[in-house]
Structures are given as structure tokens and as C-alpha cells.
């Protein structure tokens, strides 16, 4: 049975747990912005945006919960699923992006969501989606191994094939085709997932959501007090430009939200607070900045490097 109320309760609790943990590390509380879409708008529903800006550790951290409904799916949802045309829908999810102040701490993204599309006299179409991915500015093999190992452990109880499939999907999805480069070192990504039935698919989504703090907190704690200077901050701002490009050009969630009449302020909270672009810039050969491009952005079997350990 499709139980969207159980999904909603889980997601609200997940938002609470994550914001409490990050606030404890930063020392600053998240602000809460509860919102509701008027029933007269084409997209209806409510949400709860939590945002921390200008913190000691997080320059900007946003964790959004939304539960919205509409009568017509936007083009981004029906382009590859023509059978969904003419259906009304409900989309419920939690999405977060953390932009840390210290360039040695990676940016991180996580999203878990449930989608249900209905039509009179037809079976509902539902699926789960989500995942998490890491975007370092200065790569560290231990971080990458730890992050991927945690993702693999979250998925393993649901099938040995899931982590390899979702890891490859993540590598292919978070790729800037116009740049010919990955956004970061990946993680896992899945969408349109219903293969295990509702209850088991929901349990898999919960396992991914529950693994987020295990995946990210050790990295954050290990790197947040590392010394840095203007060079590192300048490179961080430059690489954040890639993050903006991906979110505005390719990201399905961003496009779905904007095309369906979603709340722009909540959708665009993933944008970094400071960012820069430079014309045809190249890192100095042999530099730590160049190592990001040569040693970390190309997709790798990070679990095969597990002998290097996790975040220290």
C-alpha cells in the first residue's frame, strides 16, 4: 500500500536530525521558514526550509522539506515518461546542500524523495529517488573512500548490485557535459525506483537518508579547522561556479521545481553565497588545484582503494 503519510513523517524527522547535528558542529542554529502554497496556484502544498548562513563552519547550509501537489506534470517530468502525461501528482522530499567556509571541507548534496502520479481509473505510478554526492575543492582519498564505503553499506542490505549501479548513475548524472568534467567525486544517485515494492523501496530510501550524517560528519569534523588562505578561498569560489552551472543547466530537481511553479527561494537555496568565474583559467601544473582535476574528478573505483582508510 502506498503510504505517503509515513514518507512525510520520516522526511520531517530526517530534516530535524540533520539540522540538529550540523548546528551542533557550527554553533549556530538554523532559521526555519515554514511556507505554504496557496490553493489558487498551479502547485499546491507546503514545506519547511531550514537555512544557516554566515556560520563559523557553514558559509551556507540549507535543508528543505517539501510536500507539493499539482494537476499537470511539467515537461522535465514527462519528457522521458510520456505515460505520465495527464496525471496529477504529489512529490515529497528532503533536499540539502552544504557550502562550508573552509575550502578543505567538501560541499555536499543529499536528496531523498517520493513521487506519486495518479489518474482516474488507472493504477497509481510511484517511485523513490535520491542519493548523495561529494564535491571537494581539495581532494583527499580517505574522504572519498569513506564517503563511498558508507553509501555502499547503506545499499548492501537491499541488493549487491545497487551500489555499483547507483554509483555509475551518479558519475554519469553529475557531469557537466559542456565542460567535459565531473562536478565532484560522486556517491550514489537513483531515480524512478520501485523494483522492491513500496515498503522495501521506502526502506532503501530511508537507509540512504539515514547514512548521510555517517558519510559526511567525520569528513567535516576532520577538515573544518585546517588552516587556509586567499589562494584556497579563490579556488573554492572558482569551483563553486561549476556547481551553479550544473544546478541551473542540468539538475532535474531544480528544473522540475521551477517549471512546476515551485517556490524559487527554497529551490535556489542550493546556490553558494560567493562564487566566481574566470575566462579560460587553468591550474598551475603540479599544484594541489591541478590534482583535483587529474586525481579526483575522473570516475574511480573508490572502494578498490579502501586500504587507504577513511577520514582521519
Image: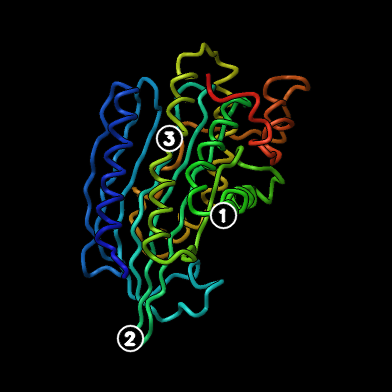
Name the N-terminal-most of marks 2 and 1: 2
Element at label 1:
loop
Q: Which residue is mark 1?
A: 250
Residues marked 3 and 2 touching at CB (< 8 Å): no
Residue 53 is drawn in which quadrant? top left
- Mark 2 → mark 1, Cα distance in angstroms: 32 Å
- Mark 3 → mark 1, Cα distance in angstroms: 19 Å
| Left-right relation of 91 to 229 | left
> As drawn, which residue projects farthest toward the top?
227
Q: Which residue is mark 3?
A: 98
Q: Is residue 78 above or below residue 300?
A: below
Name the N-terminal-most of marks 3 and 1: 3
Tell me what residue is drawn at x 22 percent, y 52 percent.
Answer: 35
Q: Is residue 185 above or below residue 10?
A: above
Depth check, mark 3 against mark 1: the one in front is 3
Look at the image and name its color scheme: rainbow
Q: Which residue is mark 2?
A: 120
Q: Residue 263: x and y, percent?
A: 33, 55
- Mark 3 → mark 2, Cα distance in angstroms: 41 Å
Amino acid at each position: 500500500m502506498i503510504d505517503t503519510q509515513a514518507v512525510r513523517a520520516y522526511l520531517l524527522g530526517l530534516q530535524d536530525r540533520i539540522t540538529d547535528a550540523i548546528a551542533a558542529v557550527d554553533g549556530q542554529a538554523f532559521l526555519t521558514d515554514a511556507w505554504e502554497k496557496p490553493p489558487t496556484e498551479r502547485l499546491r502544498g507546503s514545506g519547511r526550509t531550514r537555512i544557516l548562513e554566515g556560520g563559523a563552519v557553514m558559509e551556507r547550509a540549507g535543508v528543505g522539506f517539501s510536500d507539493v501537489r499539482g494537476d499537470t506534470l511539467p515537461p522535465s517530468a514527462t519528457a522521458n515518461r510520456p505515460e505520465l502525461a495527464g496525471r496529477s501528482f504529489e512529490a515529497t522530499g528532503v533536499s540539502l546542500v552544504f557550502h562550508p567556509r573552509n575550502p578543505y571541507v567538501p560541499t555536499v548534496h543529499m536528496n531523498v524523495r517520493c513521487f506519486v502520479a495518479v489518474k482516474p481509473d488507472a493504477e497509481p505510478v510511484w517511485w523513490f529517488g535520491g542519493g548523495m554526492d561529494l564535491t571537494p575543492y581539495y581532494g583527499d582519498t580517505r574522504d572519498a573512500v569513506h564517503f563511498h564505503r558508507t553509501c555502499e553499506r547503506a545499499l548492501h542490505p537491499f541488493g549487491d548490485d545497487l551500489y555499483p549501479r547507483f554509483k555509475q548513475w551518479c558519475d554519469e548524472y553529475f557531469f557537466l557535459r559542456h565542460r567535459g568534467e565531473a562536478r565532484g567525486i560522486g556517491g550514489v544517485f537513483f531515480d524512478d525506483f520501485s523494483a522492491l515494492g513500496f515498503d522495501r523501496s521506502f526502506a532503501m530510501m530511508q537507509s540512504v537518508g539515514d547514512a548521510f550524517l555517517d558519510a559526511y560528519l567525520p569528513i567535516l569534523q576532520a577538515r573544518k579547522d585546517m588552516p587556509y588562505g586567499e589562494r584556497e578561498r579563490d579556488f573554492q569560489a572558482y569551483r563553486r561556479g561549476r556547481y551553479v552551472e550544473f544546478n541551473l543547466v542540468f539538475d532535474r530537481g531544480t528544473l522540475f521545481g521551477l517549471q512546476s511553479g515551485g517556490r524559487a527561494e527554497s529551490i535556489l537555496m542550493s546556490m553558494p553565497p560567493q562564487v566566481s568565474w574566470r575566462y579560460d583559467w587553468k591550474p598551475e601544473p603540479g599544484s594541489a588545484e591541478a590534482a583535483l582535476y587529474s586525481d579526483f574528478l575522473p570516475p574511480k573505483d573508490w572502494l578498490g582503494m579502501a586500504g587507504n582508510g577513511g577520514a582521519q
